[in-house]
Amino acid sequence: MKKDVTQLNDMEYYVIKENGTEPPFENEYWNHFEKGIYVDKLSGKPLFTSEDKFDSSCGWPSFSKAISNDEIIELVDKSHGMTRTEVRSEISDSHLGHVFNDGPINKGGLRYCINSASIQFIPYNKLTELGYDQYTKLFNEK
């Protein structure tokens, strides 16, 4: 499921390597709530689950937490005349988005606001087939 930098389309390259931001409400996963995981588009490393995804009405995919803090890096971002916390993928150094303190209080209060261009969705029913079977345990079986 991972891509090489040369395989990225213009928007993906802009977001991932040039620290860009895709347009709100005009990206692949902003209103996507299928069961599964979201991985780093370049490294294939799992970053977020649909269990932690929520509708923040901001126009980008929002998650209350990462699968593992070992897979992401948080950096101070002082661009655009404000101070924010940037979120990057540890392995590929991909720009993912930003994390804010306005998420659901009952889920820890964080909102990881992530660009769809930097992640790839893996459906729950394909986790084993695609080598992510160890992540099935992260889901509440109903």
Image (spheres, rainbow, N blue to C red):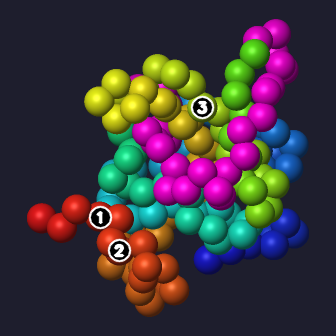
Relative vertical location of residue 36 with respect to residue 17 in this rendering, above or below:
below
Q: Say which quarter of the image contains residue 4.
A: bottom right
Residue placed under numbered mark 1 in the picture: 139
Relative vertical location of residue 71 with respect to residue 107 in this rendering, above or below:
below
Is residue 26 in sight in this rendering?
A: no
Q: Say which quarter of the image contains residue 71.
A: bottom right
| Residue type of the residue flagged with mark 3 | Val
| Residue at x 67%, y 51% (from the top left corner) | 72
Sequence-wise, the earlier of marks 2 and 3 is 3
Which range of residues does the magenta coloring cover?
Answer: 56-82
Residue neighbourhood size for the residue with mark 1, other residues' Cα within 10 Å, grouped as few (<14), some (14–19), many (≥20): some
Q: Quadrant of the N terminus?
A: bottom right
How far across and down, in percent of the image, does residue 120 sit?
57, 63
How far across and down, in percent of the image, does residue 53 sit?
39, 45
Residue occupying the far top of the picture: 81
How far across and down, in percent of the image, does residue 113 sit?
56, 35
Sequence-wise, the earlier of marks 3 and 1 is 3
Residue placed under numbered mark 3 in the picture: 99
Q: Is residue 55 left or right of residue 39?
A: left
| Residue type of the residue flagged with mark 2 | Thr
Residue neighbourhood size for the residue with mark 2, other residues' Cα within 10 Å, grouped as few (<14), some (14–19), many (≥20): some
How far across and down, in percent of the image, does residue 67 sit?
50, 56
Rendered image: mark on residue 136: 2
Q: Say which quarter of the image contains residue 57.
A: top left
Determine contact: label 2, label 1, CB under 8 Å. yes
| Residue at x 45%, y 63% (from the top left corner) | 37
Q: Is residue 21 left or right of residue 130?
A: right
